[in-house]
Image: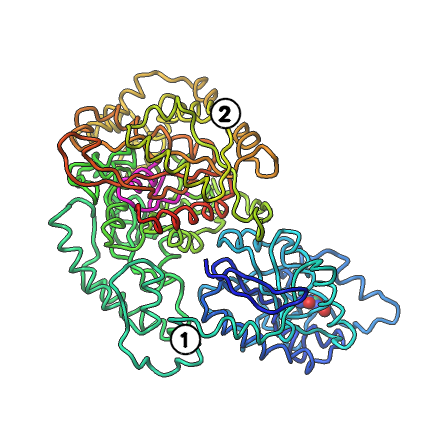
Amino acid sequence: MATFTVDAKPYAYNFPLAATALLVIDMQRDFLLPGGFGEVQGANLTAVQSAIEPTRKLLEACRAAGLAVFHTREGQLPDMSDCPSSKPYRPAVAPGTQYTTGIGDKGKMGRMLIRGEYGHGLVDELRAIPGEVVIDKPGKGAFWQTELHYELKARGITHLIICGVTTECCVTATFREANDRGFECCAVIEATSGYNDKVFKDVSLGILHWSQGLFGFVSHLQPFLDALHPLPGRELSSAVETPPQTPPEWDGSLDMPSLQAAYRSGLSPVNVVEALYAKIEAYEKVNPGAWIYRVPLEGALAMARDLTAKFPDRTALPPLYGVPYTVKDSIDVAGIATTTACPPLSHIATTSAPIHDTVVREGALFIGKANLDQLATGLTGQRSPYGAPSSVFHRSFISGGSSSGSAVLVGARLCSFSLATDTAGSGRVPAAFNGVVGFKPTRGTVPFVGVTPACLSLDCIAVLAATVPDARTVWRVIDAFTPADPYAKRPELRYYARHVNATGPLASTFRFAIPPPSALASCSPPYRRLFSDTVTRLQNLGGRLHPVDWTPFQQASALLYDGSFVLERLASIPDLPGAENSADAAAFLTRHRADLHPVILDIFHAALARGTSAVDAYRDLQARAALTARVRNDVFSPGRALGVDVLVVPTAPTHFTVGEVAAEPVGRNSALGVFTHAGNVLDLCAVACPAGRVRVGELVDGEEGEVPFGVTFLGGSMTDGDVLRIAARFEAMVRAEGVI
Ligand code: TIU
């Protein structure tokens, strides 16, 4: 990772570009312009405004260098329910107070320091652009009652360049809080100011770096401008007000950073769509069955043209601008059928899933809906009436499922990402078999709304993408608390997260566990060998191997298909328009015999035949709670000495051929999930990554070619940011070694 150095106090400040964010504190009208709260406080506004221009320069340089940018705004909710009484009361009752008005009172720019009022907004010079994060905070420090820590960790940020107003108040309060959380911070002298700089500024900043860096570092602006500018391939936005002079460069790659760089240099999404559709047509002849619906070329071109009209400023493009994407066909897109690969369930969606609307709003180009195992039930990709695509690597090998089409389309580079689902491994197994990344965030963080469920209490959205950073980019867009999702995690859970290790040996150390030899024995010989290579690589990356009690994972896995949860799949089948008694699972199966995949029918009939009682179901729920608590407390316990950061497993135990699955469709399907089934039962997050290649002759005598091998990093609930960081480091290593 490129690391930059600037002169600073108490000594040089080093910051890794990809792990650094600029944090601009409270550059709001209320603090900086006449008639706001700053004026009420008796501030010399001209003095405080002196920070605006240096902050603008710093912001421009950081944007041009591709740094993450965060802005904060101080303000209360309109009903002030988030405002401690002392905040307005203390100054108001002070003897001889100058305050005749205060927080919540009407001023010239609306109610002072109230969210949504004009004065609460950022000054025009420092407005946030698409893709930048704006954190609304009720207090002085930016971490209290906000998602700042979660958002920083979600992006793998460990270093903060801090500026804004006021130095003596919110800037240093936030700086000190960030320090406790492990962030390595540097304040920028010219880009911060306060209401009494003569008395406070030097002292406030001096305390930060006193005593060999009590809280962190302080530097001047110029060293940052020198360090950040110019970076190869980037231009300062002020320099590109005229159209680019050189033709746009695009290497044809759909990786998001390549696309974004090409769009910034003038490439049109129209050209991308044209090139892509030619490729799609050609691939259809090679490996059909990945699509259920494709947006016609004319429609895609129209959307691409709309995008260019909507975002004319190439220096301020949203994070998914012009990024072609697909959805698994259990996710609703208004006006298009959602089939869930189950014709009796097919219906034209009247509204889109919120995640679809969100990615489109952030610039993504929707090009179609991907095939899946019927009812999102299966890990093979062999259970759909719309065909069975094979692995993008080899015609004889399965694509994996249930998100079969999603993984194939990303693997064949026919879209940059696909939104899919993962209940028992449906986003991970196909990722492994097509050499792509499958990220299953913590359940209940990404809204599962507008999606036909497979097993509602275990369902989770998954992102399939070419790389870990791409999956992370999509996740940052769709990760949002949604009250409409009854399984949404409480938003407060985002307020707490473990500290970061920003510097020193601990910054690259992590603790990991692996399945015991008895569990790994289910892997094919090449998979065992490649997994062993993975363990060595992780140790070389700084990972320390810890023992783990495998029983809860094994028991959780068994609960999924041997217990009552398989019946929840029947309970999850939504009411069918016009059908009577559709909640009656047995009647549904009988009525739609002809339309259901024979393997799916067998699975459900077998589950019903077990005669599971309500007592069994409650026992399973209790077992799930007990196992989840055990794993939370004893395995992924990041605050404790014995906890591990990640459990690393082979994503699947082997890769079957189409013929092998046809010969034993249920048994081989179950075998595939041995390392994925427990994920959602135990409330874990998971990142499946490519980790090597297998010569297929090692799996099937006489076959030629290669198929990918993948591993999955599983982490405790809400530790997605940490798990992605480890996975990204591993991915960079295997990429650099050329083994994927
Ligand atoms: N009052 C004061 O000096 N500052 C604040 O209330 N907020 C910030 O510093 N942003």
> Up-down: is 230 above or below 672?
below
Label 2, residues with CA under 10 Å away: few <14, some 14-19, many ≥20:
some
Viewer-side residue, 281 vs 184: 184
Q: Quadrant of residue 521?
A: top left
In the picture, the disc for residue 455 is: none
Q: Position of residue 9 (x, y in %)?
A: 67, 67
Label 1 secondary element: loop
- The quarter of the image that holds ligand 1 is bottom right
Q: Quadrant of residue 572?
A: top left
The three-letter amino acid code for the residue at tag 1 is Glu
Q: Which residues lie in the magenta part?
A: 419-440
Residue closest to the far right: 95
From this viewpoint, is residue 596 visible? no
Viewer-side residue, 402 vs 20: 20
- Mark 1 and mark 2: Cα distance apart in space: 52 Å
Left-right relation of 428 to 50: left
Q: Give the residue at mark 1.
A: 235
Tell me which numbered mark, 1 or 2, is placed earlier along the sequence: 1
Residue closest to the far left: 285
> Up-down: is 454 above or below 299?
above
Label 2 secondary element: loop
Q: Position of residue 487 (x, y in %)?
A: 47, 40
- Are the residues at dot 1 and dot 2 in contact (C-beta closer than 8 Å)? no
Q: Position of residue 177 (x, y in %)?
A: 67, 55
Q: Is mark 1 within 8 Å of ligand 1?
A: no
In the picture, the disc for residue 549 is: 2
